């Protein structure tokens, strides 16, 4: 049986903190990768750190959202980094998605559906007529049409998404404790894997407090 796969969200702007998160989350019981977002990438030494990071699965969560020429140019500027996964908002449109995928080479392009911080009320405020589940299914079909390698969606949409999109599914909004923070569509790790997720993204549930203890708790949850 293949190992379960977890991306640890390295949500910090300090290299020293990133090093500690990586050091304290090493385990052979699950496959661990590291997600770096805007906060770390835009920090003073963030990009330099990533350029020197070796033997790790790097998920660069920049959520690109721009015209085709700009996203194409953006990925070209990242070629010196050993990135495994790179995110793009599916709302960028089919032409931008295709342009990014065409330029991606060995980087897996991950389409971001509707953020886990949004619910039906939020979508209505933005101007969408579809409800979350309907919109995410529609976005999954767009990802398939653009031949993307993976998509990001909450655990609540996994089953419906898998009908339209057969490649990797990455699931954020994973909580080991009963705390929502700023995310609204959340799910526990075991339930998300049971629903069919390929990778879970876990941040504060692991990186807040005692990281080694939190990893141990996660492994116990997944073994039950």
Image: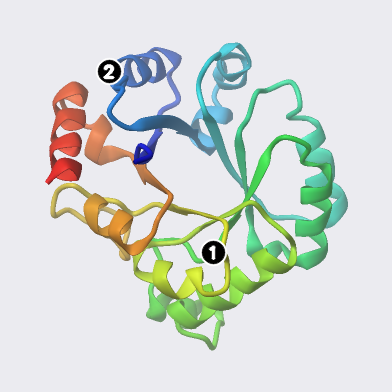
Q: Name the image quarter holding residue 112.
A: bottom right
Query: Residue 10: x, y in percent?
Result: 41, 30
Secondary structure under the numbered disc 1 in the rendered image: loop
Query: Residue 174: x, y in percent?
Result: 29, 51
Earlier in the chain: of badge 2 and badge 1, it is 2
Numbered mark located on residue 64 in the image: none
The colour scheme is rainbow
Residue carrying label 2: 24
Q: Name the image quarter holding residue 52.
A: top right
Residue carrying label 1: 113
**Farthest bottom residue?**
129
Secondary structure under the numbered disc 2 in the rendered image: helix
Query: How many marks are shown on the rendered structure?
Result: 2
* 194 left or right of 122 in image: left
Between residue 123 and residue 215, name the one nearer to us: 215
Q: Residue at x 46, y 61 (%)?
A: 153
- Quadrant containing the N terminus in the rendered view: top left
Q: Residue at x 25, y 50 (%)?
A: 189
* 107 left or right of 100 in image: left
Q: Residue at x 64, y 51 (%)?
A: 149
Query: Residue 162: x, y in percent?
Result: 49, 68
Q: Name the image quarter holding residue 73.
A: top right
Q: Residue at x 44, y 78 (%)?
A: 133
**Farthest right residue?**
69
Between residue 80 and residue 106, name the one nearer to us: 106
In the depicted structure, whether residue 164 falls above or below residue 213: below
């Amino acid at each position: 049986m293949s190992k379960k796969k977890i991306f640890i969200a390295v949500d910090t702007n300090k290299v020293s903190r990133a090093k500690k998160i990586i050091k304290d989350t090493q385990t052979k019981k699950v496959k661990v990768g590291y997600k770096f977002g805007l906060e770390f990438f835009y920090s003073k030494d963030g990009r330099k750190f990533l350029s020197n990071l070796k033997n790790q699965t790097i998920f660069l969560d920049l959520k690109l959202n721009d015209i085709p020429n700009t996203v194409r140019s953006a990925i070209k500027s990242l070629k010196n980094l050993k990135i495994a996964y790179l995110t793009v908002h599916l709302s960028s449109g089919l032409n931008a998605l295709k342009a990014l995928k065409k330029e991606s080479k060995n980087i897996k392009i991950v389409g971001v559906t509707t953020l886990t911080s949004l619910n039906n009320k939020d979508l209505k405020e933005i101007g969408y007529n579809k409800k979350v589940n309907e919109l995410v299914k529609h976005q999954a079909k767009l990802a398939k049409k653009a031949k993307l390698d993976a998509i990001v969606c909450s655990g609540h949409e996994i089953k419906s998404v898998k009908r339209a999109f057969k490649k990797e599914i990455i699931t954020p909004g994973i909580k080991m404790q009963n705390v929502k923070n700023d995310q609204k569509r959340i799910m526990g790790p075991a339930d998300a894997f049971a629903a069919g997720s390929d990778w879970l993204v876990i941040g504060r549930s692991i990186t807040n407090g005692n990281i080694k203890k939190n990893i141990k708790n996660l492994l116990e949850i997944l073994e039950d």
